[in-house]
Image (spheres, helix red, strand yellow):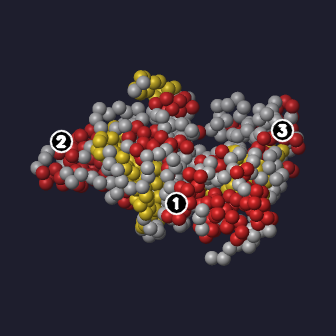
Amino acid sequence: MATAVAPAREARRSATNVASTSHAASAGRLRGAWMEGEFDVQLEGERPWQADLCQFFTRESVAELCLRHVAFPENILTMKLLEPAAGQGAFFLPLLPRLVEACYAQGKKFDILGPVIRAYEIDPEVAASLRAKCAGKLEDLGISRAKAKEIAQSWIKHEDFLEARPSKRFTHIVSNPPYIRWDAIPARLRDVYKARFKSFKQRADLYVAFIEHALGLLEPHGQLAFLCPGTWTRNVYGNSIREALTSQGQLKSIIDFSDVDSFETSADAYPHFFVFQRDISGPTKISSVKEFDKIERSGDEIVRAFLPSASPLLLTRDSAAENAVNAARQRFPKLEDVGCTIRVGSATGCNDVFLGQAKEIAIERSRLLPFVNARSIHDGKVRWAGTHIVNVFDRNGKVVELSKFPRMAAYLRKNKKALQSRAKASQSKIWWRTIDSLHPDWHASPKLLIVDVSAAPVIGIDLHGYCAGSGVYQIKSDHWPLADLLTFLSAGVLGLFVASLSAGSKAGFHRFQKSQIAAVHMPQWADLSPDWRVKFKDARKAKDGRAVLNLVAELYECDASLLENHVARDWDAFCSKRPRQ
């Protein structure tokens, strides 16, 4: 299976925005027939739009492990298998010995194999290589060279799966679909996918369109099994996919592969393997795997029943955590509904030019803002190390006229080559702007900062008004006092919710991004009793961690020890009287 890593917005962002694809479009023009009619998308340049994405391929051992969780028919010749993004064939080549053996055992001619497999691969070179590889394996199994080439040719289609309209449905669909984040997809092609696939919205990753299209091609009682990021289980753009998978059949299993090198070249894609079967009902087995000398299960497997719903799926293997989160979902609104706003920090696209000490950047002082990032958060506070960011925006978030700032203009023109080399700037007249705008409503406001990837929550309070980088998420609050919100979230609340949305292998890190932070359910500050608020403030100011955890546990109707297992990394620093085990 081919995968690809999307160009990173920042070095930190690259660790969390891995894209994967075998989805390499033919140069220049993409054409296809959608249900709604013909579409014709002209893409800039002569190269495929994915050409700058690095291709990766699924390791054979990983694919074979995944295939063990798919139930194939006793007579495998009755199978109709679809591979939507074939790559090097890792998800169907292991089945060839069984298919050929079945032909021998049943006295069938090899022509019967033609309808058994359909594999799509959009990259012509990869498709040609796969045909040769497939034909070679068939020949090794005793099929004549001419017949092996004929079968391989019929199986492997050089075509974009998202444009394909097969005339038949399939009993099994197994794949590692392309992971390409929203920003890496050309805008006009994005519009085509948005019109075609209802799941492709809310900055969705391209793999969700593959899931939706595959579901539409599945036979009654057919199985769909994909190795893809687990973001669909919790992100907003996964709503329609979750609703379909929980209402149209059974999610048989979800396996977290985040701690396994799933690809031949390492990539931080946090993949999960899920198996779905249409038209049946039953619980979901949830587990995770790790890899040292060999891939093995990490921790216990649990069984969970998911009702038909678009709600994020709880993947935790902790029943106490499951009960607490489910109860909170019933009793409390979401974090964004209690007066909080969440936004990612600002990406520049070229830190070497836009970030530095004031003495290193020879521009007008009014054009420099104090800049902080994930490394700036210590002991619940945000500490500025003297780094500035070049601000090319006015108070309304609009790009300023360079002619008004001659020193900044000279500095940016000096670095024009580096700035224009960025993908987003290469075709823009405003080649010198940062990727994200800098608006005082955010950079000048008091706020909480949360590191986007960490084992435990890393949260700090910014009372000075720093500009936050892309490695952190920001929370402003209209109703909750910011110091109280910091302590409340740090007291196991944020960690509990985020961990509950992940299968959570012990060696893994969690993503504390907008969709995960927004999944926290908590009370309105004004709805809390005056007595509780006074006790909480007193405990916070006294740094009495035991009292804080007991008060929060009272709200969530759980044991304080559960929250203690999920406290923020710097809990000891600002609640020094940590409860005993």
The amino acid beneath tag 2 is Asp
| Amino acid on which disc 1 is placed | Glu
Q: Earlier in the sequence, mark 3 or mark 2?
A: 2
- Residue placed most toward the observer, 562 or 230: 562
Q: Nearer the viewer, residue 239 or 458?
A: 239
Looking at marks 1 and 2 on the same chain, the residue that comes earlier in the sequence is marked by: 2
Query: Which of label 1 and label 3 is nearer to you?
Result: 1
- Where 209 sits versus 95, above or below? above
Amino acid type at circle 3 is: Met
Picture residue at 42% right of the left edge, 55% below the top: 305
- Does dot 1 land on a helix, a strand or a loop? helix
In x, y percent, where is residue 238? 50, 44
Mark 3 vs mark 2, CA separation in Å: 70 Å
- The residue singled out by tag 1 in the image is 322
Badge 3 vs badge 2, beta-carbon distance below 8 Å: no
350 relative position to 187: left or right? right
Query: Which secondary structure lies at badge 2?
Result: helix
Q: Which mark is residue 408?
A: 3
Is 171 left or right of 578, judged from the image as shown?
Answer: left
The label on residue 111 is 2
Residue in the image at 43% along x and 58% along y: 304
